[in-house]
Image: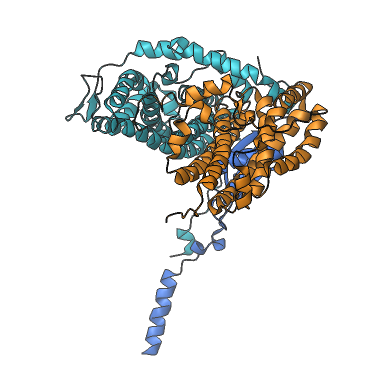
Amino acid sequence: MHDADTIQPLNGRPPYAAGDATAFYAHVGKGGKVEADDWMPDDYRAAVLKFVEMHANSELMGVLPERDWIMRAPNLRRKLALTSKIQDEVGHAQLLYRVAEDLGKPRAQMLADLIDGKTKFHNVFHYPTKSWADVGIIAWLVDAAAIVSQQALRDSSYAPYARTMKKICWEESVHIMHGRDVVLTLMNGTDSQRAMVQEALDRWWGPLMQMHGPPTDPAKDKDLHWGIKAKNNEQLRQEFLSIYVPRILELGLTIPDPALRHEGATGRWEYTEPDWAELKSVVTGHGPASQERLEFRRINFAETQWVRDALLGTPTAAA
Amino acid sequence: MTERVWEVFRQEHEGDPMIHSGNVNAPDDELAMHYAREFYGRRGESHRLWIVPRDAIAELDDPDMLKPPLDRSHKKPGGYLIKHKLEAARARATEQGE
Amino acid sequence: MTQVTPALGIDARRALAELLMSVADDEFVLGFWDSEWTGIAPMLEEDVATSSIAQDEIGHARALYELLAELTDDDADRIAFGREAGAFRHAALLNHARGDWAFSVARRYLYESADAVRLSALVRSSHAPLAALAAKMQREETYHRMHADAWLRRLADGSQVGRDRLAGSVKCLWPDAQQIFAPLAGEETLLRDGVLPEPMLALHARWQSEVTPVLESIVGELPAAPPTGDGRRRRTDDFMWLHTEFTAVAGSEVGATW
């Protein structure tokens, strides 16, 4: 036996050549990774940008429902935790806009498109908040539903996004604990506090069930096909239900869906069909708080424009 | 002044390697330092940060230079397959001793 | 480990409580106003920085309220969220709502510079728990001061709009900023015992000599404005609004835990 027989030379060939889209898709189809400076086909670049930009928008708009309560947090620890949580969401927006910026779209343009209603953000952030229990339900369950899909994104073929998702998931796990702690404290409190949690859950359940989107045909889902995301909508919803339905029920809360049950034979959760028409209407800017939230962003963005101009010496807003 | 991208490298514990963590936008090095501190140190998770303007980084990713195709096995411990040679040497030594 | 509070007479305890409450309320109220920038600051990077500073301020308030609670056999959250608006002792500087970015920068510069002078005295306090806490706060305030200085310079040198807004805010806040050094009820007792190593008026003079040249180079001449006896007792509609907000949930159900 010769040494040379068992030691393979390094394979010095790049996985795909610049301009070769077929080889590129074969690379990502096999789990290969793409970096910001690598050559990529325009449709892949556009798909990643659209996906990451909507995620960034969602983090930024997701700040607002909880921010309704930032001045009303009821004790010192909650004040610190809620402020810190909202700060983290702003931080996530920055991390994601940075990823999107490196794909070629300036941040100012993305912010302008968001406040002009040209780009979207997640359905759950189009709804108003009504009580302190919303702070708990959002941090616990909305973040939990989000983290299920975010964990799957740690495997994204677009490597800068995958790396960012690792950092974000690590931070989100703190938020879920904060939310669960708020809910547990209320459930162990007075009758009216328990009623407040139930009322909040009743309001948020519909949007939560819609959040991952309607089931899609995996064969036609190019985000899935190209490895931008790793799991389909229904897989994510099933995963959320498996973990969180037992955790909700054990607190003595009632889930407002009489059809919800775990089907032993299929291993699937059965549920009342979510209102997909509502989802479509909400994410296109017709939710109960959509316009108010966008207007709030517009006003604040305009009021701070002079600061960006003073700092950067040039107007930063794009048309 | 215009906005620049600054790459941030983080050392978790004293003596650890500096690992790339991400990047921030800032118009100058003073604010870049503040923002790096926020994004990569506000939880007390860092011992040290390096903050580098992106355009100061030279990148090399050419596989012809980094992963050349011909054999480099003599540069790595795994390139030396001594198992059978050692067995033969031990057998010979044992034989001689008898 | 139990903290041994040195045996203090009733006057000394009352005076110490007044001192702790004044510093804690300053940090608490400023922390609330500054936290309102979370999510809407001029840039995303800056948003995160400003929020951290607001959280530090609330954190300092919490530590100070805990010292106070130990002294008065009370509870930090009860002190922070359970008092009537009139019982707060923050300086008049903190009576104003958040305002625009220039207003927040001007207030933070005025506050951080004054707080640094105050902390440099409190680290020498004869009340050991206060001296130890002040030393910890001083370490976090290093970053706060760097940040406030950086923004003051940027707004002063960035654009005419920025400079005008900054100058207007400094002039508006200047008289009320002096009230950080308003004489405290029981100050003689604090000085006698070394709990407060220097009179408020001496700290005021040192602060003024530090900041006046810096600010006058931006806004022109600033009027003499000594601290007054009611500097920590005045309340405004802005503060009444804030008080209604932060007690909205905490005060919504008697005896409930949140």
Q: Is residue A112 visible?
A: no
Give the colour chain C carries in the figure.
orange
Question: Which residue is depicted at the point 58% across and 39% down?
Answer: C23
| Quadrant (top left/top right/bottom left/bottom right) for the C terminus of chain B | bottom left
Question: Which residue is depicted at the point 47% across and 39% down?
Answer: A166
Q: Horizontally, is A288 left or right of B70 in the view?
A: left
**Is B64 in front, or is B53?**
B53
Question: How far across and down, in percent of the image, does residue A154 sit?
Answer: 45, 37
Say which quarter of the image contains residue A133.
top left
Q: Horizontally, is A226 left or right of C225 in the view?
A: left
**Which chain can be seen in cyan?**
A
Question: Which residue is depicted at the point 59% across and 42% down?
Answer: C186
Residue furthest bottom in the image: B98
Give the colour chain B carries in the figure.
blue
Q: Horizontally, is A58 left or right of C42 in the view?
A: left
- Up the image or down, C176 lies above or below A10; here it is above
Question: Which residue is depicted at the point 42% across and 32% down?
Answer: A150
| Quadrant (top left/top right/bottom left/bottom right) for the N terminus of chain B | top right
Q: Can residue C30 be seen in this view?
A: yes
Question: How far across and down, in percent of the image, does residue B79 sit?
Answer: 51, 62
